[in-house]
Image: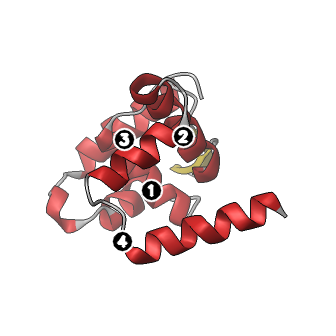
Amino acid sequence: MAERISDAEHAVMEVLWDESPLTAQDVAERIPPGRDWSANTVKTLLGRLLAKNTIAFVLDGRRYLYRPLVAREDYVASESRKMMDRLFGGRLTPLVAHLAERDALTAQDISEIEALLKGLKA
């Protein structure tokens, strides 16, 4: 994915990743209530995502049905890599150290990381 998506666009993508294809009205109805967006706001965001080739649509009679072109997993991987590159020189160890120093890791997080590392070593 070349062009970054905004936080607002990401909210629309989350809806489409959960269920698609959807009409603009369907998307608007599924946006978390705290956003308080109109259908026109959602249509604007869908237009931006179309321009970025992040979503596509098919015509169903007079309705546009939108679907993601980018998988959630691919987006998360790309954004995670960009964050690590930008903030930690592309290295994972300083990121984990930063989280550990800030007490941002729970005991469960640590157990999961340990299990992941054991699996990688095996």
Name the amino acid type tagged 3: Glu
Find numbered disc 1 in the image and state the secondary structure of the residue it sits on.
Answer: helix
Categorize mark 4 by other alpha carbons within 10 Å: few (<14), some (14-19), many (20+): few
First reached walking from the N terminus: tag 1 or tag 4: 1
Instruction: Kindly report the distance in space between the C-alpha atoms of the residues bearing marks 2 and 3.
Output: 27 Å
Please tell me which residue lies in front, 97 or 63. Answer: 97
Mark 1 vs mark 4, CA separation in Å: 26 Å
Q: Which residue is mark 4?
A: 106
Label 3 crowding class (10 Å Cα cut-off): few <14, some 14-19, many 20+? Answer: some
Percent from the top left, x then y, of residue 7? 31, 41
- Residue under pointer 2: 92
User: Which residue lies under the disc numbered 1?
Assistant: 14
Q: Does residue 36 show up? A: yes
Label 3 sits on residue: 9
Q: Residues within 10 Å of mark 2 (few under 14, many from 20)?
A: few
Counting from the top left corner in percent of width and height, residue 19 is at 54, 66
- The residue sitting at 44% across, 60% down in the picture is 15
- How far, Cα to Cα, is label 3 from label 1? 9 Å
- Closer to the observer: label 4 or label 3? 4
Quadrant the N terminus occupies: top right
Mark whose residue sits in front, 1 or 2: 2
- Residue at image x 79%, y 59%? 121
**Disc 2 marks which amino acid?**
Leu
